[in-house]
Image (tube, rainbow, N blue to C red):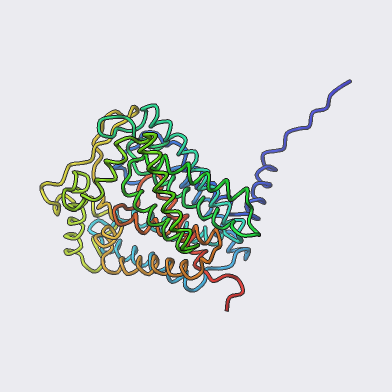
Amino acid sequence: MALTLAAPPHPARLLRRAGGVLQERPGLLAAATVLLVCVPTGEKDVAAAVHITAADLASLALVALTAVNLLRGRTPALGRADAVRFGAIVTAAAVATVGSIDPATSLTGFVRLTQVFVLVPAAVLCSLRDRTDQRLVLGSFVAAALIQGVVGVHQFLTGTGASYTGRPIRAVGTFGALDIMAMSTVVAYGLLAALALALGERGPDGNPRLRRAMFAAAAFLALPLAVSFSRGSWIATAAAATVLLLRADARLAVRGALLTAAAAVVLVGGLGLGGSGVTDRISSIGSVSAAPDQSVSDRYDLWATAGRIWQDHPVTGAGPKAFQQLRDSHAPLRLSSGSDAADATIGFQREPLLSPHNMYFLVLSEQGLIGIVAYGLLFLGLLVGCLRHARGRGPALAALALLTWVLIDFLYADIGGTTTVLTSIVLGLAARAARPPAGTP
């Protein structure tokens, strides 16, 4: 008896099917962008003008798909408020580029700013057609965080992470020591998304299995976040989780704080997870002003450098990517030549300090008063909108928490690195959550 094997589908047919699925559910591309951040990029030159990752390519595919859908009338155009916010960013960046000290170099910065703060967020906003799309993207944040969290915990337990106090115990996930903040960023996003989704499933209409799974995911992700030894991520996550819990239920926020404190005592004090490294790192947060360590001292000097650059170019700034060109002529002599990075892959390297490590100072120095007003309009508009409309809905609560994390993190960090595209996804989620619910007058 002969067996008849079905012929494999033709590649063109598969592409058409995939295209049809993406047309119906463009949020899949936004979710893919988040997950592709986990793809290792290998060793990279941190001083290079452009870094293109798999996640960047996916985000650009989302932009292209959104443009096609807009032209065909399948996606509604941006609302007036969104158009004003995003348009102000493009205008400020364009003005700063035209008046830059080096327009050719600033042009690449203009393209990157437009991608991160305008094109991708707007595409995400247009792709999130319903709560299913929003949950899909938030679920991808949780999945990416779990992947990185498992890798990070393994690095800590086996001593195969980045160097911290002379020991290879710092969890960095798949990103490596040259992108030291990336894993903690992904894990923090996933923790907040899981917590918000769990809170959104409370009540008689909620899914108890999903609620328990998300609470369990959030609880696990606290461990890799702890052994990332990232003070900035700890502060931003604690603040964002507080805002999330207060917005969801003030009494729950109090219970959550007590449970978190108890868990920290058991895990760190009782079981020794994280050891003295976590407690020492936590205690160092209180000394960043009285007795700052070298990394904090360098950050203060970089902020002062950005302020001096802004004083020379107050209205339009020095131009995108101009900070690194003007740093040495405006920085105090005590500023370090770079920060130390080491792991088993790269060995020991000195990573140059190419930005002020503060998004607001970066905008002020490179785009001047026009730029800081434009970004203030975007950030405050989204934050106020999320606060007004995040009323117990899981996706809206998640967008509020993630946006809060970004705005706090921007006080001591800026865009750059593999996870930059995730900032765009967060802004798109926030723009969607800032819109009034359907049927609201």
Residue 113 drawn at (x, y percent): 37, 57
Can I make out residue 424 in this image? yes
Quarter holding the N terminus?
top right
Decide if residue 290 is on the left or right side of residue 190.
left
Vertical position of residue 35 compared to residue 236: above or below = above
Residue 383 drawn at (x, y percent): 42, 66
Which of the two residues, 142 or 207, is positioned nearer the viewer here?
A: 207
Q: Quadrant of residue 266?
A: top left
Q: Residue furthest right?
A: 1
Can I make out residue 325 in this image? no
Q: Residue at x 29, y 45 (%)?
A: 282
Residue 57 drawn at (x, y percent): 48, 46
Q: Residue at x 24, y 60 (%)?
A: 365
Which of the two residues, 41 or 182, is positioned nearer the viewer here?
A: 182
Q: Residue at x 36, y 31 (%)?
A: 161
Quarter holding the C terminus?
bottom right
Residue 107 drawn at (x, y percent): 33, 56
Decide if residue 96 is on the left or right side of residue 399.
left
